[in-house]
Amino acid sequence: MNQNHSAVASRESVSVLATNKVLRNTYMLLSMTLLFSAVMAVISMTLAQTVGLPPMTGLLTIGGAIALMFFVLPKVANSTKGVGVVFLITGLLGFGLGPMLMMYAGLSNGGEVIGLAMGGTGVIFLGLSGYVLTTRKDFSFMGGFLMVGILLAIIAMVANLFFNIPALSLMISSVVIMIMSGFILYDTSRIIHGGETNYVLATMGLYLTIFNIFVHLLSILGIMGGDD
């Protein structure tokens, strides 16, 4: 009996160590990719101001990042190449933010809008991930609801491309922020409970939630305060 208990305890200890390693590696890689993405955004803004960027630059770079995410990353996620691909994806996404940030920077209170969006994103991410890490609650039950929610939000965003209604844009951005907040709970929970054991994929998931929260907070703040 004692041997059985020792074996169980040993397996649990190994499992906890493995989970902690995934969590540590995820947050380390996430920090580096966020910094790299910010640097690429600054480079993009600088190029836009000095030499100008071709039309559709933001759309093309973000489209390239999405293609890499779906068609390349799954094939290399279990090797060291996966880390390089994550940096490439996040770099492209950061570079693609440049034209959008330039647009908001041109507002009378553009610096304040961008700063508030960054601060709000940080508060949301740190608050929700900290809550999961502290309480150790399992939010895996949210997966289905979140996927349905994001599909409905995408449909609404496509529809609004034709209608271009500011109030609808505001509502969509608010809903997306709530959905992405749910994904922070869900993804962090999966890491600490062993549902996600690949730190490359875990990093990519958390980065996308942060990216989307920032973009949609920027949209809300721009709509609400852009004319001040």
Image (cartoon, rainbow, N blue to C red):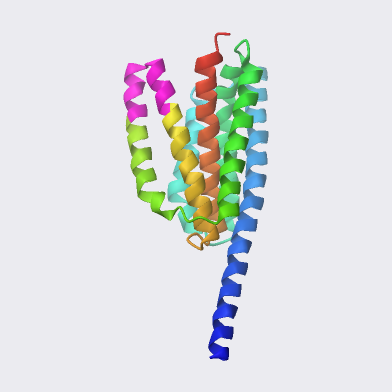
Q: Residue at x 68, y 35 (%)?
A: 39
- Which residues are the magenta region? 156-172
The answer to which quarter of the image holds residue 145 is: top left
User: x and y percent of residue 133 in the render?
Assistant: 59, 53
Give the x, y percent position of residue 122. Answer: 62, 36
Indicate whether 2 appears above or below 139: below
Residue in view at x 60 percent, y 57 percent: 23
Across and down, in percent, residue 45 comes to 64, 24
Look at the image and say whether residue 164 sits in the magenta stretch. Answer: yes
Is residue 70 positioned above or below 173 on the image? below
Q: Is residue 116 magenta?
A: no
- Predominant SS along the magenta part: helix
Up/down of 63 relative to 219, above or below = below
Answer left or right for 156 relative to 8. Answer: left
In this view, the residue in front, 83 or 204, is 204
Q: Residue at x 58, y 64 (%)?
A: 19
- Front position in the image: 5 or 107: 5
Residue under the image location 51 percent in, 61 percent down: 193
Q: Residue 68 at what x, y percent from top left?
A: 48, 46
Q: Quadrant of the image for the C terminus?
A: top right
- All told, the count of numbered labels is 0
Front one among 167 and 78:
167
Q: Nearer the viewer, residue 146 or 62?
A: 146
